Image: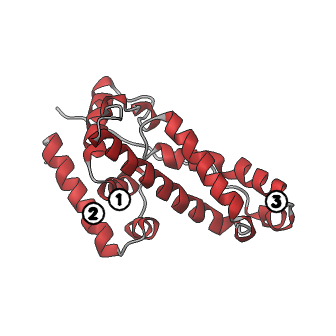
Amino acid sequence: MSSTLTIQPLAPKEPDATDGELLSSADPRQHLAKLYADYAKLVAWFASRLLNRPEEVEDVVHEVFLIAAENLPGLTEPPKIRGWLKTVTLRRVGRRLRWARMRARLGMAPGSSEMVELLVADPGASPEDRAALSELLVVLSELPVELRIAWTLRYMHQEPLEAVAELVGCSLATAKRRIAAAQQRIQRELGDD
């Protein structure tokens, strides 16, 4: 009897759209402080769904807000800020994943056994579900970065296909191919039908 593991995308609440005036009129320090206060949890949540270790998530959050500090004049419209931050986060995560893979090839990186499944598992998950998630995370860590990110956005973040394509910067057809290729490898490795 096989149980189905449910991965719940519990994103932080969207900041209040009325903050646009404060963001456009604030001095740079206040502007950045407001952005961080409103969106740091979102960036951390998004990065944690793609990375394996909490310290990497913290680093990505800091990197994203350093980049945001350089782009403050353009970050004044709350509806657009979320997408921009997700895109920057995704690029920083992709870069980290590629570097981690390179370090692993050179024998300089910790193994995939350091996965932190609590970052994505339902707190009420059974030991069998946690084991299944751990196996999935190992398989995901071995996928090429482009496949891993596309699959994770689609199935762990439950992003629509169009959003996956936009976030990873490719066509809809390419996003579908990446997701399908990742799914094939996952099914092959885990023996799921």
Amino acid type, label 3:
Pro
Q: Is residue 146 left or right of residue 78?
A: left
Mark sitting on residue 150: 1
**Front-lying residue, 86 or 72:** 72
Q: Secondary structure at mark 1?
A: helix
Q: Is residue 103 visible?
A: yes
> Which residue is under mark 3?
28
**Distance (Cα) linking label 3 and label 2:** 40 Å
Q: Are marks 1 and 2 in contact (CB under 8 Å)?
A: yes
Q: Secondary structure at mark 2?
A: helix
- Residue at left offset 28%, top offset 29%: 131
Number of the front mark, 3 or 2: 3
Q: Badge 1 local density, few (<14 within 10 Å), some, or many (20+)?
A: many
**Residues at marks 3 and 2 touching, judged by CB atoms closer than 8 Å:** no
The Cα atoms of the two marked residues, 1 and 2, are separated by 6 Å
The residue indicated by pointer 2 is 178
Task: Tell which tag, 1 or 3, sits nearer the viewer.
Answer: 3
Q: Earlier in the sequence, mark 3 or mark 2?
A: 3
Instruction: For mark 3, give the secondary structure.
Output: helix
Of residues 119 and 103, which is closer to you in this image?
103
Q: Residues within 10 Å of mark 3 (few under 14, many from 20)?
A: some
